[in-house]
Amino acid sequence: WETIIKRWVSNKIKEEDRTIDQWAFLDRRNVLLPRDYILPSSKKLVLPKNEKNKIDVLFFLDTSGSCVSYAQRFFDAAKSIPPEKFNLKLMCFDTSAYETDLKSGKLYGFGGTCFKCIDSYVNSYISKTNPLHGGRKTFVWVLTDGYGSSISPQYPKNWFWFLTNYSTTAYIPKQSKIFKLSDFS
């Protein structure tokens, strides 16, 4: 399953490194035309690489009894994400969401499972970090067995679910991307 993450990261880096056509520079063909004409430029605008252009990834680990044994794989996958391209935020959850990090490797929670706390945290995170981008550049990854509460995230296509053995998809939005870890043994 780590290959899915690496492939996704690789694709997102390629997307960000693309140049875009722009209309700002004076083109050589525009010399004889009146100044109010705008023609496409032969130059490309390269997007600057800074914090605002990083892709946000919120990576959640279900810390209920059936999933906590996947903690090492969770942290190993997180280590493969290049910090210069992504704002990676590691989270644990049970009925609440708890922030953790690679350095400490601490886990929190260990109660039941509720997916609504993830959706609440994601919505709060998006509104605090950049309310104008509306979640289009924020992706949510969840490592769980799928047993929890039903949710309806605003952008379900930006949610990736990594399901452990003996899992269910009954509570996961159908528009999300769903992967079973057993397919990647």
Image (cartoon, rainbow, N blue to C red):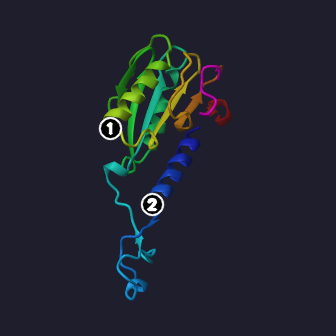
What label sits on residue 129 in the rendered view? Answer: 1
Quarter of the image where one finds residue 145: top right
Q: Is residue 106 visible?
A: no
- Name the secondary structure under disc 2: helix
Q: Residue furthest bottom?
A: 32
Q: Main secondary structure of the magenta part?
A: loop
Q: Is residue 180 above or below residue 65?
A: below
**Residue found 59% across the figure and 21% down from its top:** 146
Three-letter amino acid code at the position of disc 1: Thr
Q: Quadrant of the C terminus?
A: top right
> Where does the image place residue 168, in percent across and percent down from the top left?
65, 20
Residue annotated with mark 2:
17
What label sits on residue 35 in the rendered view? Answer: none
Q: Is residue 185 above or below residue 133?
A: above
Q: Is residue 182 above or below residue 41?
A: above
Q: Residue furthest top?
A: 111
Three-letter amino acid code at the position of disc 2: Asp
**Residue found 41% across the figure and 15% down from its top:** 109
Q: Which residues are magenta?
A: 167-177
Alpha carbon of mark 1 to alpha carbon of mark 2: how far? 22 Å
Choose between 105 and 159: the one closer to the eye: 159
Choose between 74 and 146: the one closer to the eye: 146
Q: Quadrant of the N terminus?
A: top right
Q: Residue 182 lies in magenta, yes or no?
A: no
> Where does the image place residue 124, in percent across and percent down from the top left?
36, 28
Mark 1–mark 2 contact, CB under 8 Å?
no
